[in-house]
Amino acid sequence: MQADTVDWENGRITDEGLAFMRSRLGVPMPDGSWNTEVTRDGVWHFAHGIGDDNPLWYDRACAEASPWGRPFAPPCYLYSHFNGPLLRPEQGRLSVDEYLPGVLALWAGDRWRWLRPAYVGEEILPRTELTEVTVDEGAFGGRSVTQVEKVSLVSSNGDLVAEVCRTLKRFERGATRGRSRYLDRARASYTEDDRARFADQYRAEAARRRGPTLRAVTDVQVGERLPRLLKGPLTVNNLVGFMQGWGGPLCAANRMSRTILDLHPGVRMLHPVSGIEENIESPHWDRELARASGMADGYDFGGQRISWLSHLVTDWMGDAGFLQDLEVQLRRPNFLGDVTWLDGEVVAVTPRDGVVTISLQATNQLDEVTAKGVAKVRLPAG
């Protein structure tokens, strides 16, 4: 397929496109991996990218002294095992390239389930399939689609380590462009007092981390609030740090970038000012491409905000806890310049099973809720 056969500016949701999607339900779809083996460096790079400085992720002695007995990865690190560059046909295609190419895709949320930690030294590979296709009429003045993909993360010995169901919302760019309620929102700016407040928050966070101090399920009460975390302000530097850890299927340089555009024409975009060929990841940090997509400005990755919420939970639960379930709905865009405050509250405790249920919320500087979620944590008996 030639790049100019995909109309990225006016990609349409057609009956033929929907029929093809439905024909692929349940069919395995190859995924590229940024990481195939869990390494100490890969683990630390991911933790670095979400701002998680827990020694558990980079200090071997700390990890070996934990109840797990050896180095392992933060829960959402496994994003990096199905988010690699697709430089060869056998590595498969992105679902937004395969299904409805040229149609805007926005990350709406994920539902994670972990069965055990991902240990340093093991190989973990993804198995991906499309599981749901729902058509909605009238959104933004046009048709939209909700698609759900399930990714199973499987070790080389056949263990299912984790699985995640990702929900994407697909919109026709022609219908969204100019109709977004965010187009007139100015980029956030901050005062010296704001900067001091952010700095004080960051300096205090590590001391509130539970770390090796045991948190037993019998110590937890309904209504207990998790120590608040701050993320941001969101900058291009912040995005680059995250991508160093989790990877990126479309971020490549020079000849390799050309290879990706040739293999995946559905991801191509043309910059409206420079005339340079870009791809659908570039609107995350480029204002002109974001607005060409129907967004007001650059914005974060859905997996980035979800990983931030997992950090809130792991800081609270301590090194002996295990995050077994995390479901997050992304409610609003998180634009360049925004700050995100992360809060959590215990809403249920089941001592018999050792499970604590936590409600989660992400709020920006305008007191707008940008994400909501629920986590289930398994804690030791004491």
Image (tube, grey):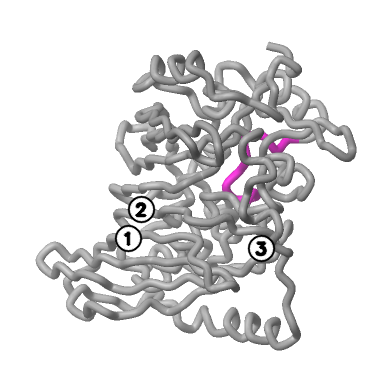
Which residue is disc 2 drawn over? 327
Query: Compared to 35, does 72 lie above or below?
Result: below
Query: Compared to 341, does 128 lie above or below?
Result: above
| Mark with earlier residue (2, 3) | 3
Q: Quadrant of residue 324?
A: bottom left
SS label for mark 3: loop
Which residue is disc 3 drawn over? 234
Q: Residues within 10 Å of mark 3 (few under 14, many from 20)?
A: some
Which residue is disc 1 drawn over? 375
Question: In this rendering, would 82 be left or right of 135?
Answer: right
**Residue at screen point 62% across, 36% down:** 175
The circle on residue 197 is none
**Residue at screen point 35% across, 29% down:** 131
Contact (CB < 8 A) between labels 1 and 2?
yes
Query: Compared to 249, does 194 lie above or below?
Result: below
Amino acid type of the residue tagged 1 in the rendering: Ala
**Residue at screen point 72% across, 42% down:** 282
From the top left corner, tell me how far across and down residue 140 is, in percent: 55, 41
Regarding residue 248, the answer to whether it shows in the image is yes
239 or 15: nearer the viewer: 15
From the top left corner, tell me how far across and down residue 339 is, in percent: 61, 69
Image quadrant in which the N terminus is located: top right
Query: Compared to 210, does 64 lie above or below?
Result: above
C-alpha span from label 1 to label 2:
6 Å
